[in-house]
Amino acid sequence: MPAWGWVVVAVVVIALVAAVLIYNRLVALRNRVDNGWSQIDVQLRRRYDLIPNLVRTVQGYAAHERGLFESVTEARARAIGASAVADQADAENQITQGLRKLMAVAEAYPDLKANEGFLALQEELTGTESKIAYARQFYNDQVMRLNTLIGSFPSSVIAGTFGFREREFFDIEDPVRAPATVEFS
């Protein structure tokens, strides 16, 4: 075989090896993008499951606290509006009972647990939002690498031949960029 024949064979072998390497890199990046999206999905589902459970917990405690304050407030209003001694005594007894319950709650839960529940809700939401942000950043980094490889020559030829397509970045709108807010009504 002439020397130029060996050069042609070497060029073909180098081209095939390069094509295989590029193809394998495209597959690896595609899998990393898919994994990145999977992680975003896991965190979003975690948020979807977490928020209602924590909100119900906090609202359940807040409802108990609200009921206690309402009973004390009602007893106070009755005491202020009482015209007979018996009505006044009854109202004062209810205030005393309500205050005892309030003091028991305060002793058992120095921060009234509603605060701790709310802080736990905030902490969990912040943690989840941070995990979503990290997963989104990882995903977008992998998408950028994949899209760059797909758009670059000679990998664009391999990508086009084997059906690799550019992926979209996971970019959220500005109002959603702030941590999730929960309103108690």
Image (cartoon, rainbow, N blue to C red):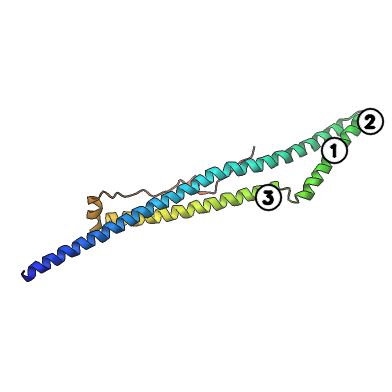
Q: Give SS at disc 1.
A: helix
**Looking at the rendered structure, which numbered label has been put on residue 116?**
3
Labels 2, 3: front one: 3
Q: Do the residues bearing badges 2 and 1 touch, measured as CB atoms within 8 Å?
A: no
Which residue extends farthest front? 1
Left or right of 71 on screen, residue 57? left
Which residue extends farthest top? 84
Q: Quadrant of the C terminus?
A: top right
Tell me: residue 103, above or below residue 20: above
Residue for point 90% across, 32% down: 88
Quadrant for residue 80, please give it. Answer: top right
Left or right of 168 on screen, residue 132? right
Mark 3 and mark 1: span between their CA atoms?
Answer: 26 Å
Q: Name the amino acid type tagged 3.
A: Glu
Counting other residues with Cα less than 10 Å from the Cα at mark 3, is it few (<14), some (14-19), or many (20 or more)? Answer: some
Q: Name the amino acid type tagged 1.
A: Ile
Give the mark nearest the N terminus, 2 or 3.
Answer: 2
- Counting from the top left corner in percent of width and height, residue 115 is at 69, 48
Q: Give SS at disc 3.
A: helix
The residue that mark 2 highlights is 85
Residue for point 86% across, 30% down: 81
The residue that mark 1 highlights is 95
